[in-house]
Image: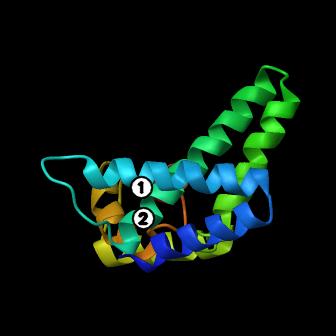
Amino acid sequence: MAALKDRLKTDLVTAMKARDELTTATLRMVLAAVGVEEVAGRSARELSDDEVLAVVGREAKKRREAATAFDDARRTELADRERAEGAVLDAYLPVQLGEDELVALVRAAVAESGATEPRQMGQVMKVLRPKVAGRAEGGRVAAEVKRQLAG
């Protein structure tokens, strides 16, 4: 079994014993999403740590998007709940790249791929994707690549 999935289950039991409703609900939700992912496709399988991490990342992104939607609808109590759930999930994700680190990685990937114009963005992304996996959202990375190739 994946170590991250074991950690999620252990933390769930700890949160249940501590009667921490927010953490309990959040970890149950992410473990359910992992379970769905495990049985998706032709046959059931055990997810690796990287795959579990991807599921946690997707769930965290959903929380951020939901918080924004609730803010736009002036439902601050629901937005606050989504942000709190996102904070619980962030504890399981790798530290996100800072702006300077991202700019440097993109600059190096552009040089490595030899790309000179925006339509060669795919080549840069192919080089860059393994280096930033899980540490920066794809949209943020793509925006920086476009900016550097356009300039």
Furthest residue in direction front, as rendered: 17
Q: How crowded is the residue under tag 1: few (<14 C-alpha within 10 Å), some, or many (20+)?
A: many
Q: Residue at x 31, y 48 (%)?
A: 119
Viewport quadrant of the N terminus: bottom left
| Amino acid beneath label 2 | Val
- Could you say which quadrant of the image residue 98 lies in? bottom right
In this view, 112 is above or below 55: below
- Could you say which quadrant of the image residue 27 lies in? bottom right
How far apart marks 1 and 2 lie (CA) works out to 6 Å
Query: Observer-nearest residue: 132 or 3?
Result: 3
125 relative to 89 in the view: left or right: left
Mark 1 vs 2: CB contact within 8 A: yes
In this view, 43 is above or below 80: below
Q: Which residue is mark 2?
A: 52
| Amino acid beneath label 1 | Val
Q: Which residue is mark 1?
A: 34
Total marks placed = 2
Q: Which mark is residue 126?
A: none
Query: Observer-nearest residue: 140 or 85?
Result: 85
Furthest residue in direction top, as rendered: 73
Is residue 138 in view? no
82 relative to 122 in the view: left or right: right
Q: Secondary structure at mark 1?
A: helix
Q: Residue at x 36, y 65 (%)?
A: 51
Q: Secondary structure at mark 2?
A: helix
In this view, 65 is above or below 29: above
Q: Position of residue 5 (x, y in %)?
A: 46, 70
Is residue 86 in view? yes
Q: Residue at x 64, y 60 (%)?
A: 89
Disc 1 or 2, which lies upstream in sequence? 1
